[in-house]
Amino acid sequence: MSHTVYLALGTNLGDRMVNLAHALVLLTPHATLRNWSRVYETPPWGYLEQPAFFNMVVEAETDLEPVGLLDHLKLLEEKIGRGKSVRYGPRLIDLDILFYDEIEMRTSRLEIPHPRIAERAFVLIPLAELAPTRKLVPGGQTIADLLARIDQSGISPVTVRENDSPAGLAVMFQEEPEALDRFIGLPPSHQREYLQHILEAKKPATRRKRFDWTVNQLSIKKD
């Protein structure tokens, strides 16, 4: 059975756009992307002595149950290279479940909806692009209402077109399942080299050519 989920992504170390793309490409075998926000640069939250973040939200469909999805996201964070840090501190990637269908759950490991959505402009702004009328709890305020009441200073969009988004690259891999399978089998450092090569292209047509070249290289490596 397929479930609709909203996931938040954040990163503030290394090549932030590559980090987002890396997470989304690795996510696609277990979560099919349906929609995504722009990427926003946002000031740090909670722990201020650190670089600015890139944040975005995606809507996806998954067959994983909530705890299984959580486990998968934590595994992806480790594969990409997230290490231990202070709470709310710098990280290569952070992946959070915001919503999972219409369920509400509270366990020692997982709370859905995410308990701090209403406090975080860096989540509310991209989430409002995808689900402005969704309510945090039944009978409560909508995402748009919550956003209107929170300080949004210092937050600005980084991507302006669909082709600029790292999610667009993930969808390209999503449409090439054999190439995606080969890509996932590579060491993380090799994965990042391919992603960086594609994302460095500024024009959509050039990015497509570099993606096609990557698919061809993955096929050659298999043969």
Image (cartoon, rainbow, N blue to C red):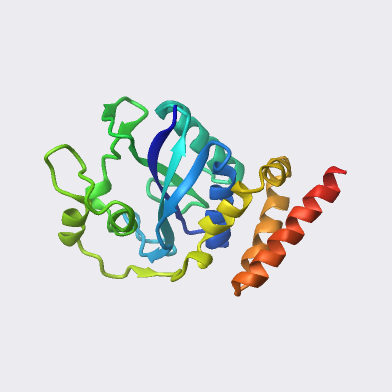
- The residue at the point 25 percent across, 54 percent down is 132
Q: Residue 143's spot in the image, x, y percent?
A: 22, 52
- The residue at the point 62 percent across, 48 percent down is 175
Q: Is residue 49 left or right of residue 150?
A: right
Q: Residue 221's spot in the image, x, y percent?
A: 84, 47
Q: Nearer the viewer, residue 169 or 86?
A: 169
Q: Quadrant of the C terminus?
A: top right
The vertical placement of 34 against 74, above or below, is below
- The residue at the point 13 percent across, 43 percent down is 140
Q: Quadrant of the N terminus?
A: top left
- The residue at the point 64 percent across, 71 percent down is 205
Q: Is residue 185 left or right of residue 2?
A: right
Q: Residue 58's spot in the image, x, y percent?
A: 42, 50
Please, which residue is most extreme toward the bottom here? 203
Q: Nearer the viewer, residue 18 or 169?
A: 169
Q: Residue 171's spot in the image, x, y percent?
A: 56, 52
State how many labels appear. Answer: 0
The vertical placement of 175 against 199, above or below, is above
Please, which residue is most extreme toward the left here? 139
